[in-house]
Image (spheres, rainbow, N blue to C red):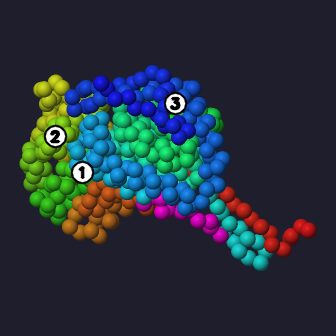
Amino acid sequence: MVTQYKNLINGEMVETGGWMDVVNPANEEVIGQVPACGADDLDRAVAAARAAFKTWKNTSHEERQAACMAISGAIKENAEELFRLLTSEQGKPHAQAKGEIYGAAGISAAQSTLKLEDVISEDSDARLSRTRRVPVGVVGGIVPWNFPLMMAIQKIVPALMSGCTIVLKPSPFTPLTTLRVAELIADKVPAGTVNIITGEDALGPMITSHPDIDKITFTGSTATGKKIMEGASSDLKRITLELGGNDASIVLPDADPKKVAEQLFWSSFQNAGQVCIAAKRVYIHEDIYDDLSAAIAEYAANVKVGDGSEQGTGVGPIQNKKQYERVLELIEDAKDNGYKFLTGGDKDPSGTGYYVPITILDNPPEDARIVAEEQFGPVMPLMKFSTEDEVIERANNSEYGLAGAVWTADTDKGVEIAEKLETGTVWVNEFMHLSPFAPFGGHKQSGFGAEYGLDGMKEFTYPQVITVKKDNVVA
């Protein structure tokens, strides 16, 4: 019998009427059902969040921290169950699923230590002026399917720590782990502060345009981000958007191909390439291109593609059929245009599960779709470059600006190039490292606003300036 999961509304796990199936991408079997919420269910959740906000906004830092630490503890204590559930709905291998579960617990604990202090702008004989941060109100959080629990936590925790309450919508493709966490924390956070509801794609616009939601925080595609801006414009909701990326990695000629091949591989293929900050374009200096591309292809040949629950799997399936078909379309386009493949390029013959073989392209042109578009799958285009100025211009020639990386034996040179890249985050000699204490956000069409750190927490607040005239006391 398929397990049915409930939603969290006002501190209780509830059913809301109809049901949606959740499919395991490794075998296309239904593994769970979740409520299909409509407008009435959303209204209930928002009303609960609004009522809770009246009290929660006045709580102390210590009370907020205790709630977030309780969330962290619940995730950590149930990690074994949660990572297996995550693999079954998302597809990522167990090792990577463990990383997400423990990462979510760690982020919750770390961000619970952050505190927005008042700032004194004037303290003179005439007046005292200070800026405090006050919570926005009820937050609507919309979460994608590639890191469902991690993305949920990085919206829930800063909302709570800033004094807001939240109504969170997981992706309909990957709601199970988040709803299980909802069940685990239902009695650990005050009723109404955290509400988690599920629904089809139509629920997202309802959240965005709901008149009693004050802020939207969204992670997902740029196309959807634009629609959210439109929906939120009617009442000028505050918005944080973490959107798509077509991240470039630049490998300078002094890099050792044997040392960087494995790291470059995983910078593109972790989570089957379904990472917003994955290396989606890899530029390699012509002096080492042949050696490094051969080393990456050789490493790829020993990585197992398969069910994430099976031992030894390194790359799991694409999470859902729509994205699977898009990745296959990009591969077919590359084949139709005669681009050269170092590995992959063919659909998995088994016909069951959304598997795409590890695919590496050999120096496709800059205007190829697989270079110009975000593939979000296990496909890695390698391109040659000759000069620093050339590769910087090519890397920046994108509507996106989320992240990038530079690989070199000369870290000073790496930083010099990093400072010329038009992205929110740049790594030198590593990839995908994010700190809960440092802001993360995109430039250009990769979004705006920030997550993580004090900058991310400020996104959930308004500044309020209070000025007291000292020498004009009215009796």
| Sequence-first tag of 2 and 1 | 1
Which of the two residues, 219 or 212, is positioned nearer the viewer here?
Answer: 212
Give the amino acid at mark 3. Pro
Q: Where in the figure is residue 185, as x and y percent of width and height?
A: 45, 46
Q: What is the number of the mark on residue 267? A: 1
Measuring from the top left, give residue 166's x and y in whole percent: 54, 43
Farthest residue to the right: give it. 475
User: At 45% from the left edge and 56% from the top edge, which residue is drawn?
Assistant: 69
Q: Which residues are magenta?
A: 110-120
Q: CA distance from mark 2 to mark 3?
A: 38 Å
Q: Is residue 264 visible?
A: yes
Q: Is residue 402 visible?
A: no
Magenta part, dominant SS:
loop
How far across and down, in percent of the image, does residue 238 sit?
58, 44
* Label 1 element class: helix
Secondary structure of residue under mark 2: loop
Decide: is 59 above or below 28: below
- Please name the residue that numbered disc 3 is placed on: 205
Left or right, 210 with respect to 250, comes to right
Against 150, residue 204 (above or below) is: above
Count every numbered label the image shows and give the total.
3
Q: Please, which residue is most extreme toward the top here?
A: 18
Say which of marks 2 and 3 sits in front.
2
Residue behind mark 2: 310
Amino acid type, label 1 = Ser
- Element class at badge 3: helix
Was residue 427 drawn as part of the magenta stretch in this picture? no
Of badges 2 and 1, nearer the viewer stands: 2
**x 55%, y 61%: residue:** 62
Marks 3 and 1 sit apart, C-alpha to C-alpha, by 33 Å
